Amino acid sequence: MFIVDILEHTLMITMFVMVMMLLIEYLTVLSKGNWSISFQRSSWLQIIFAAVMGILPGCMGVFVVVSLYAHRVVNFAALATAMIATFGDEAFVMFSMIPGDALKLMVVIFVIAVATGFVLNAIFRDKTFMVLPVNHLKFHQHDPDCYIFDKAAIMPQLKKMNFQRALMLTGGLLVLFFVLAGQFHLGHEHSHDHKWGWEMISFLVTTGIGLFIVLTVPDHFLDKHIWNHVIKKHFLKILLWTFGAILLIHSFKEYLDVENWIRTNQFIILVIAVLIGIIPESGPHIVFITLFANGTIPFSILLANSIVQDGHGALPLLAESGKSFLLVKFINILVGLIVGLAGLYLG
């Protein structure tokens, strides 16, 4: 029963994460990359824009800011703002496990990112460490094959359904069936009441959106955006990291008095959370989300980890400018430690 509960919890979180990623991908293609650059000459608008891009769940918003920075459309202060604001794919996990606290974290981290951005803007004076010419950036090319909805094409696609679409539809419908049948238990971890709470309703709405997208998008979008980008790159990793984190926490709680140790050594945990935040990868940080969800660590440590970590957002920056990467990571660590220590001090 112990493993079954963990598997159920893991599957629910993973499904929610996948659908949210799918929705972000869908909306990005819908926009066709028509981003306005009217903010380009205003540093404070760049910072606000970067913060908004940063807090968008996933890494896509940060990729936008890194791309703009690499082509000298936004300055270093805006880049650092986005990196502080983002917490990568973990945002999807947070909204599935602790939605209320995730929203609070998003608001707090947005304010911290914007405030830091204005301070950095005063220090660096619109500076960038890139060498590409201004306006070198050519954002989305309008691919005629890249669209998201064609009513006339839906039935022909379903009649000649490919393996990927059939697999995703079958998986989504099976999960939906088991949830409605009361086999999967949403909400509190140890509750086995089949109730129509907000967890049940939000999960059903989310799953319905995912099924609609998979059912209606053309093969090009399904193969290039959903299968190759979301499923192949993220599904197994999120599933395994979530399962591992939940299993680890449950095992520690079962055999060790780890909660008491963590509560009496919160400074050490804060330092560990900040150091792990340096890793430019989504996954390891799920441990801190799980610890917070279980009431083992305070909000300030989760906030510090979220400030420092950038998900995959820092990887293209590392490829473009090692100096910018190191400097922005140093700033992230400094801000994360200051905020974390202040939170612990204030209780």
Image: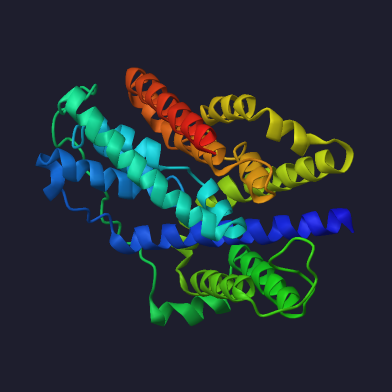
- Which residue is rendered at x = 39% and y = 52% of the image? 107
Where's residue 223, x and y in %? 51, 57
Q: Residue 109, how many percent across, how many down?
A: 40, 44
Q: Residue at x 77, y 80 (%)?
A: 181
Disc count in the image?
0
Location of residue 174 (image quadrant): bottom right
In the displayed orientation, state which residue is furthest to the front.
Answer: 346
Q: Is residue 244 left or right of residue 22?
A: right
Q: How is the image coloured?
A: rainbow
Q: Is there any visible trace of residue 191 in the rendered image?
A: yes
Residue 12 occupies quadrant: bottom right
Residue 218 x, y percent position in the rendering: 45, 68
Looking at the picture, tell me which residue is in the foreground, 34 or 78: 78
Q: Is residue 67 above or below residue 206?
A: above
Q: Quadrant of the N terminus?
A: bottom right
Quadrant (top left, top right, bottom left, bottom right) of the C terminus: top right
Q: Considering depth in this image, is 323 or 28 the residue closer to the camera?
A: 323
> Residue, x 28% and y 59% (percent of image)?
32
x and y, in percent, of residue 157 in the image: 51, 75
**Left or right of 70: which side holds 219?**
right
- Indicate whether 134 appears above or below 46: above
Relative to 176, is 107 above or below? above
Depth check, front residue: 25 or 42: 42
Q: Residue at x 57, y 79 (%)?
A: 159
| Residue 132 in view | no
